[in-house]
Each structure stands twice: as C-alpha cells, then as structure tokens.
Image (cartoon, rainbow, N blue to C red):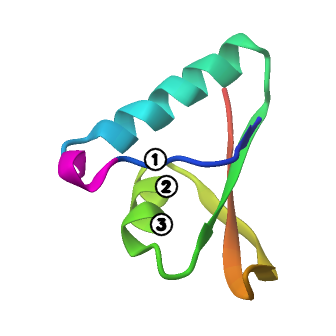
Amino acid sequence: MHVCSLAVHPKYQNRGIAHQLMLHLEKIAHQKHCQKLFLCTAWAMKEAIQLYENLGYVKEGYLRNHFYGEDFIVFSKLLK
C-alpha cells in the first residue's frame, strides 16, 4: 500500500494525530492483505522523518529531483 499524502493542520499538530493516522493506515493495509506500506517525504520534513522512524519505517531509497526539483526519501515498513 502506498501512502500518497498525510498532513495535519498546524493548529492540531503535536497531539499524536499523525501517529494515530499512520497506525490506522497500517490496520487498513493489514485488513486488505497488504504486505508492505511505503511512502515518500522530503528531506526537510524532519518531524515526519522522526515519526516514520519511530513507527518502524526504514529508509529504502531516494528519489532525486522528485517534486519541484526536491529530493525525497522513500520509507517502507513490512506488515505482520
């Protein structure tokens, strides 16, 4: 399953909402018999990178000049 986009309005950030959204996406992926969840994020998105790593996602690769010339990191997580 590919997570295309995830965002929390700045007014509601730092409340664990993104964490809960990711856990819910993992549950949906599991119910749909997906074996792997993957997503991309920009290098500058330090908080997002920390969230994904804390949830057990690993850096799998890089996309050079992916979006408006910005490099992105590919993260993935194998689902149990």
Q: Where is residue 44 in the image (x, y as percent from the top left)?
A: 48, 81
Residue 46, horizontal then vertical, whole percent:
41, 74
The residue depicted at 61 percent of the width and 48 percent of the height is 5
Can residue 70 be seen here? The reply is yes
- For disc 3, the neighbor class at 10 Å (few under 14, some 14 to 19, many from 20) is many
Which residue is disc 2 drawn over? Answer: 52
Residue 3 lies, in percent from the top left, at 67, 43
Q: Residue at x 76, y 77 (%)?
A: 62
Amino acid type indicated by mark 3: Ile
Residue annotated with mark 1: 55
Q: Quadrant of the C terminus?
A: top right
Answer yes or no: do the residues labelled 1 and 2 have beta carbons within 8 Å? yes
Q: Is residue 69 left or right of residue 5?
A: right
Q: Which residue is drawn at 79% across and 30% down?
A: 35
Which is in the foreground here, disc 3 or disc 1? 3
Residues at circles 3 and 2 in contact by the CB criterion of under 8 Å: yes
User: 50 and 7: which one is in front?
Assistant: 7
The quadrant in which the N terminus is found is top right
Kind of element beneath mark 3: helix
Q: Residues within 10 Å of mark 1 (few under 14, many from 20)?
A: few
Q: What stretch is highlighted in magenta?
A: 9-14
Query: Which amino acid lies under the numbered mark 2 shown in the image of this protein?
Result: Tyr
- Give the residue drawn at x 38%, y 43%: 18
Above/below status of 41 relative to 4: below
As helix, strand or loop, the secondary structure at mark 1 comes to loop
Indicate the amino acid at tag 1. Answer: Leu
Q: How many labels does the image show?
A: 3
Within 10 angstroms of label 2, few (less than 14), some, or many (20 or more) residues?
Answer: many
Residue 12 among those drawn in magenta = yes
Q: What element carries label 2?
A: helix
Dot 3 or dot 1, earlier in sequence = 3
